[in-house]
Amino acid sequence: MGTLKSWFLEDPLYVFVALAITELVIAAMWRERRTRRLAWMLIVPPILAGGVFFLSAGVVTDREQIREIAR
C-alpha cells in the first residue's frame, strides 16, 4: 500500500513514464492496423495521466506536509 501511495500521490513520475510508454505502444499498433478500436484506445493513457495528476495535486500526504513544514 505504501508503494502505491508513493507512486500515485507523492511522486507520480513512474506512472507518467509507464503511461507514456503505453501510449507509444498503442500508437505503433494503430499505425500498423488503423482500426477504430486502437484509435479510441489512444485516448485512454492521457485521460489516466490527467486523473493521476489531479489526484496527486489534490491530495496532500503526511510526508508532503512534513516537508512543507520543514521548509
Image: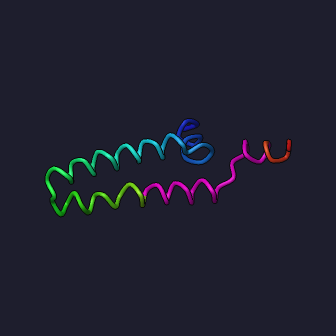
Furthest-front residue in view?
A: 31
Left or right: where 28 falls relative to 9: left
- The one nearer the camera, 31 or 44, is 31
Question: How far across and how far down the image is residue 14, in percent?
Answer: 50, 40
Left or right: where 40 falls relative to 1: left
Image position of 21 with respect to 33: above or below: above
Q: In which quarter of the image is the N terminus?
A: top right
Left or right: where 20 falls relative to 9: left
Image position of 47 with respect to 14: above or below: below
Q: What residue is shown at x 42% (from left), y 42% (from top)?
A: 18
Residue 61 part of the magenta-drawn span: yes
- The one nearer the camera, 34 or 37, is 34
Magenta residues span 48-66
Q: What residue is shown at x 15% (from left), y 59% (from top)?
A: 35
Q: What residue is shown at x 79% (from left), y 43% (from top)?
A: 66
Q: Main secondary structure of the magenta part?
A: helix
Question: How far across and how far down the image is residue 32, in percent?
Answer: 16, 50
